[in-house]
Amino acid sequence: MTAPSAASSTSAPSTSATSNPAPSTSATSNPAPSSDAAFLTDFHHVATIGATDNDGVDRQALTPEDKQTRDWMRAWAEDKGFEVRVDAIGNMFACLEFVPDAPFVLIGSHLDSQPLGGRFDGAYGVISALFAALRVKESIAESGQVPRFNLAVVNWFNEEGGRFAPSIMGSSVYAGLFGLREMLAVEDLEGTSVAEALNAIGYNGTDTPPEAISYAEIHIEQGRILEREATNIGVVESSWYTQKLDIDVLGEQSHTGATAMADRHDALVAGSKVVLAVADVVKEFEDEALVSSVGQHVVEPNSPIVVPRRVHMVADLRSSDPAVVIAARDSLRKQIADIARDHDITINVEDFDVRDKRYFPEAGVELAEKAVANEGLSIRRLETMAGHDSVAMNHRVPAVMMFVPSVDGVSHCEREFTTDEDMVRGLGVLTNVATELVAGELSDVRDGEIWVGKSVAEARA
Amino acid sequence: MTAPSAASSTSAPSTSATSNPAPSTSATSNPAPSSDAAFLTDFHHVATIGATDNDGVDRQALTPEDKQTRDWMRAWAEDKGFEVRVDAIGNMFACLEFVPDAPFVLIGSHLDSQPLGGRFDGAYGVISALFAALRVKESIAESGQVPRFNLAVVNWFNEEGGRFAPSIMGSSVYAGLFGLREMLAVEDLEGTSVAEALNAIGYNGTDTPPEAISYAEIHIEQGRILEREATNIGVVESSWYTQKLDIDVLGEQSHTGATAMADRHDALVAGSKVVLAVADVVKEFEDEALVSSVGQHVVEPNSPIVVPRRVHMVADLRSSDPAVVIAARDSLRKQIADIARDHDITINVEDFDVRDKRYFPEAGVELAEKAVANEGLSIRRLETMAGHDSVAMNHRVPAVMMFVPSVDGVSHCEREFTTDEDMVRGLGVLTNVATELVAGELSDVRDGEIWVGKSVAEARA
């Protein structure tokens, strides 16, 4: 099933070192601990935790499956000589201290998934960061050259936000964007708080997290650009402007079989018009300038023979251009007010989780380009439509965000796929970037104070 | 709060026997066990079980609150000398055996409610049946005249169908319309089966239910006709033709922030069009000739940043005219096929819970009219849009279905209301009907074999 076993079973001529790095690094049955083969073995092992019927995983934040991946990471890291710390929001840091008291380069992503999600989203970033860190450690041990900074691999808490909203929670608390106490009080749909759920799986940590000097992350693209252009690596220049709308449609509960149509105030009928308004608002702009959706949508009381009294939904609006999101949001508020009036019901709409378009530091983009050149691969610059932990971290320290190709561009589903070959290429690039970061690269971007990614206003000025 | 306390605290001249039957029957602090005052006290006591903030009740089938009302009924009935039996589907029968081995007249309704439902729907019918039976027992004891049949009060399992679909489950199993084993295997949205839930509250009975000879039920109207026409009692001539559609919208899960709009197969967008098609199909017919709704609607995976892969919903269609429902159903299937094609997704549609329009026996309608005349009240004939246990029972034995007025016609919501005065009037009428039924009325409708309500085809022939 995994590359190592395939490689050890045959010496077919097609596994040449340049075209297929995965099998080339090891053809023994006991690959070196930091080898590509070991990386692929471990990656595919972690994919069995919370595995679903159709090759996906279901490891929502703080579930038993999330605990299993956390336990796996802890055991792996401690076995390799990392010191594992867990902070109060459940972020895990596997630390390598080369220089006492120096700050840390952080590399990583997240091990939690969407419900029936893919096995690459997040997990690829954490596991490749573990192997990149191990390789950096080995290089330092071999060369005897002490670097400028320490290195830690991070598994951020609740990047996905499927169970506990908002998403990108752990890295945003670390970066100071969300309050710790407020996030610990967030509840899932069953009324379980983050604090209770952390306690339940034993990851309510008390450790002081390592102090970051810079951050790097590698992730699957979740789009089709790299695949279409046959490019190995993407480096992110900026993140899209995003916001959510909390929409609460309040009708009147009545009997489906005994209430005249004229007497009804059906929350689901009005709510369905809201869903379609959210979908159709993209037509007010250029093709694909805006993406919109309603992903969460709960009907009450949800009985086959009761006219619904309430629909609570969350709409998601994203664009590279902040003005497009703002115009779409204004148009939707107006349309929703009209729907409420037509149905003589109340619809409350609130903005939340507004995330400004932000630029990653140019020096970090160039660092990634240099690392890719070192590996003999191809690269292009792009934007990220999706949120990532790197977007939060980029508020606090200079961050580098890189992508590997996604087959068909699909994500947040079981069909999500990236080839072993592309994963191994990304690991090589991340190792290069981490080596440069611990040597001091990007640290001067701080310019004497905490560096923040440029906002739209700053970039335009 | 209840009539008895008001009556016992004053002898105001307004409480005359003819205009206000509730307080007139008892002005003592210990009303007679079968008095109107005792009935109202017990009715309002049961309304405290599972009471909600706004005067409703939440007692879905086989919940702890449903168990409490069942325990209350058992204690009440045993205290008054009834023998309580529970059958394999959890129907409760409080039996009075006057004539050994004779069949039973059944009277009753259901104690379960919708989520955030009203306190009158069903409970009024069971509690008034308990008091009507007690009065019949007392009359027989006083007169010494042995009736022709025995009498039992029934609390049917799961009339509402909010937790376990389909509705009208217990009486339909009793009447032979649904299979016992099939219904015991039905699961709620959490995957708990009827059998497991019956076990959990200790109402998985093993008693043989009493054999019915006839059936009577009184219920709130859940409509506005009686109130608008200032009529005391409605008697049901026929039930509407109803059917449900199980609609499963199967799209593709993807990332709300990383999937181009053109690449999406959003189940909720397509599902919202289905909801609106169900609402709008009524416009193809005369005003209020058809009522339609979607009451149950579940989105998967229901995460704020995932494009939904599935919407599962139940649509409900009802009309006095079967041809209207059939035409609406055909139109919807065509429209839904078009929606599926437009969105390049699968939508499976299945008919279920089809209930033919059926007529109640004319002799039963006339029996109710005679009882109302005996009580000096007014009556009119009408149809029922809503399903009732009496509709199922009318397949097996001749059934009489009566209504008392509903304020504003609202039902399946906390605001549901019927006055104490109207409830007491209905109790008097039900007592009259039960007295006639145990004396032998309607039993000749059987005509030597099991009587079935006339179907549409039979009535037209």
Image (cartoon, coloured by chain):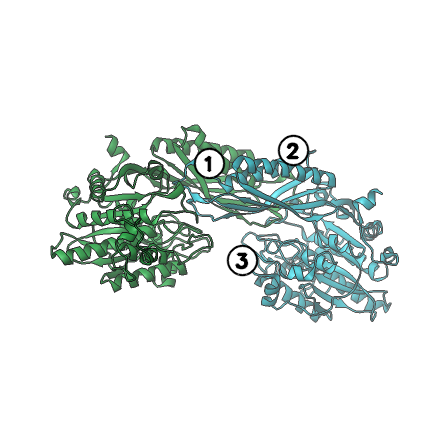
Chain colours: A cyan, B green
Q: Which amino acid does label 1 sit on?
A: Val
Q: Where is residue A85 in the image (x, y as percent from the top left)?
A: 71, 68
Q: In which quarter of the image is the C terminus of chain A?
A: top right
Q: Residues within 10 Å of mark 2 (few under 14, many from 20)?
A: few
Q: What residue type is labelled 2?
A: Lys
Q: Where is residue A327 in the image (x, y as percent from the top left)?
A: 70, 37
Q: In this view, does B117 lie to the left or right of B254?
A: left
State whether discs 1 and 2 lie on one chain: no
Give the chain of mark 1.
Answer: B
For disc 1, the marked residue is B278
State the residue lying farthest toward the left.
Answer: B145
State whether discs 1 and 3 lie on one chain: no
Residue nearer the viewer, B163 or B131: B131
Q: What residue type is labelled 3?
A: Glu
Q: How many marks?
A: 3
Task: Tell me which corner region of the image, top left, top right, bottom left or bottom right, holds residue B209.
Answer: bottom left
For disc 2, the marked residue is A283
